[in-house]
Image (cartoon, rainbow, N blue to C red):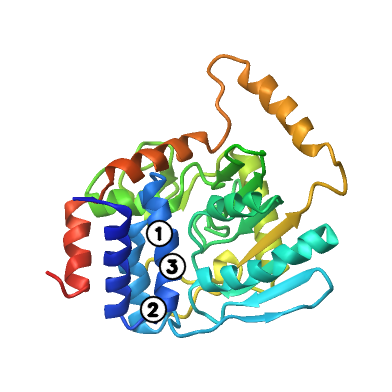
């Protein structure tokens, strides 16, 4: 089913409304999911809605939670998501952290008692449009073993980097520290497809192409031992620093039962001007050097191209998912 941006937003908000999610919260969540669909990232788009709304209905996510913001230090903001959706807490936290970064040169936003926060690159892009360089980290429920280990101890633990390029698309790096995001495996399971070998191990530690076995096993880290070490760094930055649950303490993003995941996010915001007023010029020297080489493309460029195409042509939502969402919205 081909849907334009407006139709996607209306359908998404209708499903959340039918699940008792307040309109303001629903709009904040749906905006992020629509942008993921536009950017060609369906694993972080509307495929998440059944899981989000099931958890809202079960109470695992407190859909009516209001983020609580505190300022533990002059350039620090701590946003308590209060076991609600992550998106409103991040929105409110950044609304205070961005002015701090512009005034102080640097600001830190920590988010605690949080939930799945979608595509980290969206926030890096938004901050770059504010003229800020950013590093963003999130832990996620356990899915990846430490190197040479056998038990899932880290999440796929995404991280993102963004910086402005005057008059051009921001430079955005966004990656999961597993070879692929776990949502891609969940998407393959929903579609009844196999996954490529090398993405995951089953519960016995053996390679598998069965997405169900992969979800019951562990993800393979990107870069092997180096990826596992970086996952540890993200775990410390996003969970230990924010007082949030570690991956091995967090409940699943994909199940309605259980306690709230209670994971964390950390945002580092930097104004490049005070350190180097020639930052834009120096950045373009680097980008120009890279782009002069045949076949080189800057990170994030493909996503911007896909977004432009999908805004013009619409997003192809799988028929089964479209039918399920209409049913949940009471429109079947």
Residue 162 image position (x, y, % from top left)? 64, 46
The quarter of the image holding the C terminus is bottom left
266 versus 125 height, above or below: below
Classify 10 Å Cα crowding around label 3: few (below 14), some (14-19), many (20 and above): many
Q: Earlier in the sequence, mark 2 or mark 1?
A: 2
Image-based side of 77 in relation to 222, left or right: right
Q: Are marks 3 and 1 in contact (CB under 8 Å)?
A: yes
Image-based side of 141 in relation to 105, left or right: left
Question: What is the number of the mark on residue 29?
Answer: 3
Instruction: Give the camera-side residue of 191 and 223.
Output: 191
Classify 10 Å Cα crowding around label 2: few (below 14), some (14-19), many (20 and above): few
Residue at the location (21% across, 72% down)?
A: 328
Residue at the location (67% across, 23% down)?
A: 288
Q: Earlier in the sequence, mark 3 or mark 2?
A: 2
| Residue 217 in sight | no
201 versus 168 height, above or below: below
Image-based side of 7 in relation to 136, left or right: left
Q: Quadrant of residue 108?
A: bottom right
Q: Which residue is mark 2?
A: 23
Q: Mark 3 against mark 2, which lies toward the viewer?
A: 2
Query: Disc 3 versus disc 2: distance between alpha carbons?
Result: 10 Å
Residue at the location (48% across, 73% down)?
A: 85
- Label 1 element class: helix
Q: Are marks 2 and 1 in contact (CB under 8 Å)?
A: no
Residue 133 image position (x, y, % from top left)? 71, 49
- Label 3 element class: helix
Question: What is the number of the mark on residue 33?
Answer: 1
Query: Disc 3 versus disc 1: distance between alpha carbons?
Result: 7 Å
Q: Quadrant of residue 70?
A: bottom right
Residue 268 image position (x, y, % from top left)? 72, 57
């Amino acid at each position: 089913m081909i849907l334009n941006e407006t139709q996607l937003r209306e359908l998404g908000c209708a499903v959340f409304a039918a699940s008792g999610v307040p309109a303001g919260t629903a709009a904040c969540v749906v905006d992020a999911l629509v942008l993921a669909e536009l950017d060609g990232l369906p694993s972080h788009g509307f495929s998440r809605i059944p899981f989000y709304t099931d958890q809202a209905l079960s109470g695992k996510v407190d859909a009516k939670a209001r983020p609580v913001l505190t300022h533990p230090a002059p350039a620090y903001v701590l946003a308590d998501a209060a076991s609600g959706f992550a998106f409103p807490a991040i929105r409110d936290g950044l609304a205070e952290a961005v002015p701090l970064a512009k005034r102080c040169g640097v600001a830190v936003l920590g988010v605690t008692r949080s939930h799945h926060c979608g595509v980290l690159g969206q926030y890096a892009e938004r901050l770059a449009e504010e003229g800020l360089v950013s590093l963003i980290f999130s832990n996620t429920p356990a899915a990846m073993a430490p190197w040479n280990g056998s038990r899932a101890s880290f999440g796929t633990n995404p991280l993102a980097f963004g910086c402005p390029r005057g008059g051009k698309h921001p430079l955005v790096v966004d990656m999961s520290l597993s070879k692929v995001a776990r949502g891609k495996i969940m998407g393959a399971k929903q579609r009844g497809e196999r996954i490529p070998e090398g993405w995951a191990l089953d519960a016995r530690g053996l390679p598998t192409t069965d997405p169900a076995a992969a979800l019951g096993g562990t993800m393979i880290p990107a870069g092997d031992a180096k990826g596992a070490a970086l996952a540890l760094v993200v775990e410390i930055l996003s969970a230990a620093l924010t007082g949030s649950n570690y991956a091995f303490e967090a409940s699943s993003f994909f199940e309605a039962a259980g306690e709230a995941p209670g994971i964390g996010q950390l945002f580092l915001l930097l104004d490049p001007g005070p350190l180097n007023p020639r930052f834009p010029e120096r950045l373009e020297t680097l980008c120009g050097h890279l782009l002069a080489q045949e076949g080189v493309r800057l990170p994030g460029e493909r996503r911007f191209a896909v977004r432009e195409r999908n805004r013009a042509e619409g997003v192809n939502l799988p028929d089964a998912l479209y039918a399920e969402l209409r049913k949940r919205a009471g429109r079947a």
